[in-house]
Structure formats: C-alpha cells, structure tokens
Amino acid sequence: MEDILRLTTRRAALAGLTTMAMVGMLAACASAPDAAPAPSASGATESQAPATNADFLGCMVSDSGGFDDKSFNQLGFEGLKEASAALGTQFKQAESQSDTDFAPNINNLIDQGCNLIVTVGFNLAAATDDAAKANKDINFAIIDDNSIDLPNVKPLVYDTAQAAFLAGYAAASYSTSKIVGTFGGLPIPPVTIFMDGFVDGVNYYNEKNKDTVEVKGWDVKSQNGSFTGGFAAGTDAKQAAQTLIDAGADVILPVGGPIFLSAAEAIRDASKPIALIGVDADVFETNPENSDLFLTSIMKGIKPGVEEVTKAAADGKFDSTPYIGTLENGGVGIAPFHDYESKINPDLQAELSAITADIIAGTIKVESPSSPK
C-alpha cells in the first residue's frame, strides 16, 4: 500500500523504524466521521460528493459495532470517504446491527450498482465469500480476514501481534501493581492476535528486566481467556474490566471496538490510577472524553488501506493480492504516550525503538496462531 508506506516517512529515529515513527500512521484517523448522510429507502446511504466518475461507486458494510465505534469500522469508513472525495465519486454505506444483517446489506449494495464493496471485519467473511462468488464482476475487499482466495476479493490484514508486543512491554514497564490484564469481544483471530502479542511483550519485559509482571485475562498456550461475547459496550464489557480491576490490574487492554468504553466506565467508578490501551486507532484522539486514561494504543492502517484499494479499483488497477500490515511497512504500530509521557520510564522509548528494529530484523520473533500468512 503506497499510502501506508508514505506515512512511515514521519519516523523520527532508527532510519524510520522506531515505535514513535508509527505514531503518524493514523493521525488522520483522530476525528470521528462527519454525520452520515440521510438513509435511503433501501437502508443504504450515499455521499453528496460531485460525481466526476459516474462509472465507479465504492461501498462499505460495517460490522455490528457501527461506523461510530471509534475503532475499525470508523477507520474503514473514513478511508472510503476520503478516497471518494479525492476521486470525486459517490459512495454508499450500510451499517449492520447484527450478523443477520451482513448478507442482506451486501446484497442491497450489489443491487444499487456498487463496483467495490468493502466489508469490515472477520465476521463478514462468509457473507463476503458468497457474494463474491455470485458476483464475479464486482470487486470486494475485506478487513481482518485472509481466508478468501478469489480474484475479486482483496484481504486487508494486519500482523498486530508485532505492535501489541510493544504495548505489552510498555504496559509491564509502567505497571506498579505488577499485574496487567486484557479481555476481548469475541475469540476470533483479529482479537486474539492482539492478546497474544500483548502477553508475549509482557513476558519479554520480564525476561529482560528480571521482573514478574503477570497478565490476567488471556493464556497464550491454551488460547483461552476473557471475552464479552460481542463488540458492544455494556454490562458484560464493564464486568470483564471490573474483574481485572479486582484482580489488581493497573493496565487494561480491551480488544473489540466500543467495549473499551465500558472499561473506561469501570475505571472511573473504581477511582484508581488504572491505564487503558486502545486498539486499531489512536483512541486518545478518537475518544477525547477518555483521553486521560490511555497509556498508548495499538494501531493498524485500516484507513489508508481502504483508501488505497478504493483508488486502485476506481483506476481499474484492483489487485486481489492480500495486503499484510507489519511494523516494517508501517501497517501497524503504537501511538504516542500522550499524557503519560512524563509518567513512563525515561528509558522506555529507547527500549521500544530497539525492540522495533529487532522485530523487523527478525532477531525477535513475534508469532501468534492468528498472525496472517
């Protein structure tokens, strides 16, 4: 992805391979999408951009988190909007309330003449596969799934275990209780890959610093841990966070769109100095109401990925080769420490820069059963 690669030029050290270099990767993702256009009778909505290329229509179907989830749905939607604005084309989107909406939403957009349909999330894989097989003249892209091997489907996947490894190391360095925790929405690869990398990063910190920081909520070996059963904020997510707080965790990684909002609520209620780690976007930027809680975020380049595939499809250059975001190509990274900059160990930035370089060089192996191949 040229757009993602260009973003890496912001890197400030290690010839562009440092952790803080990846900070700029999603800076444009900080703001929430503009208010969505009014829905049509069909349930989809379209942009009001001037159509200078009436032959192309880019479209998107969300996962159940919705386009205002401050996370991967929002990032994808922003990418579609910005690409369409640059192209001077219209776009349509359909928001899913549950998994029963996936196939109807995709078919609805097919019926409206979409040339590219981007589906957001692993959970849409089956519906995307079925639609792509039945509509070979339409191009598809799917975020967070690499299981579809069709000439008209491009997977956009991210080896977030690499960036989560850095966040785990940072969490262990910051923790004073020597307990950190994580929980997820659903036990699916795009979720557990964060948890795997996070735990391995904590373990690496312990190994290098002869420490004993413990991770609650996820066991890498058994691939078993704490999940809320979905990606919606609510009682289950708040209880999962509360369980970690009760166990003594002073850093918590919620993996799954808006569930972090419930974790933030639990922290406010506890009135304890507990830090959060965001996922997908720099959540310090996308959720300013809780910005004071975020130590950092584990980011992936969903927005530039969607922009690139949309522009390529509009130019007749669609390519089904999977894109895999890594630390090396700038597709994943961690956000700045923002308000926590003065609270972290002064040596942490240099340590993370060295770890980043070693992961890229292959000196440090970061592997997850969920890593894209």
Image: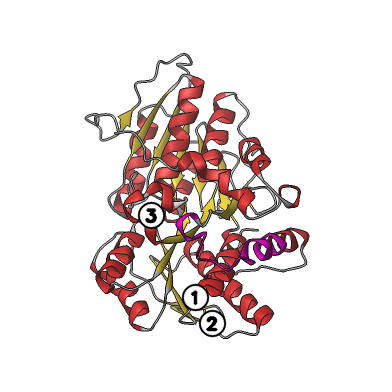
Q: Secondary structure at mark 3?
A: helix
The residue under label 3 is 291
Query: Seen in the image, is 209 located left or right of residue 170?
Result: right
Q: Position of residue 43 (x, y in %)?
A: 25, 35
Query: Seen in the image, is 327 located left or right of residue 337?
Result: right
The residue under label 1 is 175
Residue 336 on the magenta span: no
Instruction: Say if 231 sits above or below 273 in the image.
Output: above
Local crowd size for mark 3, using a 10 Å CA cut-off: few (<14), some (14–19), many (≥20): some
On residue 310, the disc is none
Three-letter amino acid code at disc 3?
Ser
Instruction: Say if 209 sits above or below 228 in the image.
Output: below
Give the residue drawn at x 51%, y 21%.
Answer: 87
Q: Are marks 1 and 2 in contact (CB under 8 Å)?
A: yes
Quadrant for the C terminus, please.
bottom right
Three-letter amino acid code at disc 2?
Val
Q: Which residues are magenta?
A: 338-355
